Amino acid sequence: MACATQRADTLLVFLPGAFLKPEEFEREGFVRAVRERELAADVMLVDANVSYYYDQTFIERLHTDVLAPAQRGGYRSIWLVGISIGGFGALTHELKRPGLVAGIVALAPYLGRRPVGAEITKAGGLRTWKAPEGPPPDDEVDRKLWPWLQQYADAPRSAALPPLYLGYGLSDRFASNHRLLAEALPEERVFTTEGGHDWPQWSKLWRRMLDVLPLPLLAGQHALPVAA
């Protein structure tokens, strides 16, 4: 909790990547970075391991076990912060269950299969790509995720969506798909760093992103730059 005596109005929900443990967010300084900036935001570390994605129960579990109770408990603003497949989970939850979260931070998110991304690249990017009409060739979620993400390339439609902040390493194994999404987002919501798919990059990105996320400060505090 941000304050020992009362619950904050804002909640940050951290979703780990595949085979990562929720306590790693503490070990790698994610929670400390929030506290250093004296943000009026409580933090929840969710044990959403990869098995929830394999059995396709992630969206329902996140909604039923985490977000709906948090909303009933009085949180007015809930942000999802997901790494890798956790970022994928944050995005697909909003796709399937829209309207519960105030914003999404996706760090090195898995965005689906490379062939789908290659189709979008061949079409000139997400702004010019036209989603295929008719029944999709398979039922994989990325067939629905990319048309939904395309809304962020259109200002009127994106205004109805929660703000999306993207961070990734330029040598990340998923970087080709990250670049496709980055091109559709406002420049100030895209953060990159050297390196690949690992904690050092994610920690650097998170600290930089925290300095611009529209999160409230504890009473009596003023925004000050914090060393990365």
Image: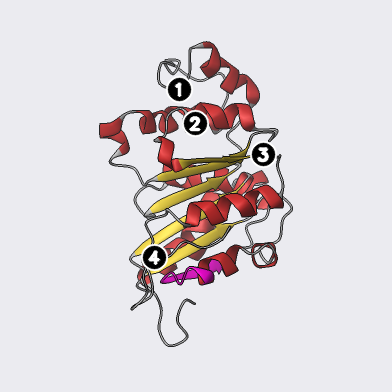
Mark nearer the viewer, 4 or 1: 4
> Looking at the image, which residue is at 38% across and 46% down?
163
Residue 205's place in the image compared with 36, above or below, is: above
Circle number at residue 114:
none
Q: Earlier in the sequence, mark 2 or mark 4?
A: 2
The amino acid marked with disc number 1 is: Leu
> Looking at the image, which residue is at 49% across and 49% down?
105
Q: Earlier in the sequence, mark 3 or mark 2?
A: 2
Dot 2 corresponds to which residue?
Answer: 181
Nearer to us in this view, 49 or 8: 8
Circle number at residue 223:
4
| Cα distance between the residues tagged 4 and 1 | 35 Å
Residue 102: x %, y % from top left: 36, 54
User: Which contiguous range is marked in magenta?
Assistant: 36-44
> Looking at the image, which residue is at 58% across and 57% down?
228
Dot 3 corresponds to which residue?
Answer: 194
Q: Residue furthest right?
A: 19
| Circle 3 Cα neighbour tier, 10 Å, few/some/many (<14 / 14–19 / ≥20) | few
The reply to whether residue 36 is visible in this rendering is yes
Decide whether residue 63 is among the magenta residues.
no
Dot 1 corresponds to which residue?
Answer: 126
Question: In this image, 170 relative to 59: left or right?
Answer: right
Q: Are marks 1 and 3 in contact (CB under 8 Å)?
A: no
Residue 137: x %, y % from top left: 56, 18
Residue 134: x %, y % from top left: 43, 16
Q: Earlier in the sequence, mark 3 or mark 4?
A: 3
Q: Earlier in the sequence, mark 1 or mark 3?
A: 1
The amino acid marked with disc number 2 is: Leu
The amino acid marked with disc number 4 is: Ala
Q: Earlier in the sequence, mark 2 or mark 1?
A: 1
